[in-house]
Image (tube, grey):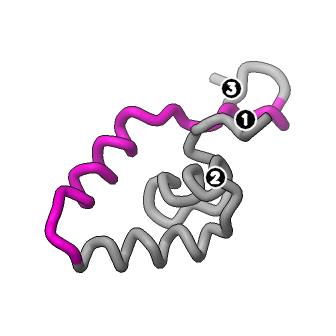
Amino acid sequence: MSAPLVRPRDHRMIAGVCAGLAERFGTSRTTMRVIFLASCLLPGPQFLLYLALWVLLPSEKDHGRSGSGTATSW
C-alpha cells in the first residue's frame, strides 16, 4: 500500500508539495525538488500546477499532539 498524497508537516521548504509527492512515489525529497526545478526550464504550466497542488492537497494531520491540537489554550 502506498502513502497517501498529503503535504507533510515536516521537511517542507515552501508548501510541502514536493515532499508529499516524494513520499507518495517513493523517491527522495531532494530528487523531487530537482525534478520540479528542472521542469520549470521547459515550457508549460508547472508553476501553476504547483500552486494548484498547494491549494488542493490536504496538509498532514498532526498525530503526535494530544488534546485540541493547539499549543496554547485561551
For mark 1, give the secondary structure: loop
Give the CA distance from mark 1 to mark 3: 17 Å
> Contact, CB < 8 Å: mark 1 with mark 3?
no
Q: Is 57 placed above or below 17 here? A: above
Q: Nearer the viewer, mark 1 or mark 3?
A: 1
Name the quadrant containing residue 40. bottom left
On residue 73, which mark appears?
Answer: 3
Give the magenta-colored segment's residue range. 42-65
Name the residue located 55 percent from the left edge and 37 percent from the top edge: 59
Name the residue located 65 percent from the left edge and 62 percent from the top edge: 11
The image position of residue 15, as x and y in percent, is 45, 54
Q: Few, some or many C-alpha atoms within 10 Å of disc 1 (few <14, some 14-19, many ≥20)? A: few
* For residue 71, side relative to residue 46 (left or right): right
Give the CA distance from mark 1 to mark 2: 21 Å
The image position of residue 5, as x and y in percent, is 58, 38
> Contact, CB < 8 Å: mark 2 with mark 3?
no
**In the image, what residue type sits under mark 1?**
Asp
The image position of residue 14, as x and y in percent, is 44, 62
Quarter containing the C terminus: top right
The one nearer the camera, 10 or 43, is 43
Task: Assess whether residue 57 is covered by the magenta stretch.
Answer: yes
* Mark positioned earlier in the residue sequence (1 or 2): 2
The one nearer the camera, 29 or 61, is 29
**In the image, what residue type sits under mark 3?**
Ser
Quarter containing the N terminus: top right
Q: Few, some or many C-alpha atoms within 10 Å of disc 3 (few <14, some 14-19, many ≥20)? A: few
Question: What residue is pinned by disc 1?
Answer: 62
Q: Nearer the viewer, mark 2 or mark 3?
A: 2
* Mark positioned earlier in the residue sequence (1 or 3): 1
> Contact, CB < 8 Å: mark 1 with mark 2?
no
Question: What residue is pinned by disc 2?
Answer: 25
**In the image, what residue type sits under mark 2?**
Phe
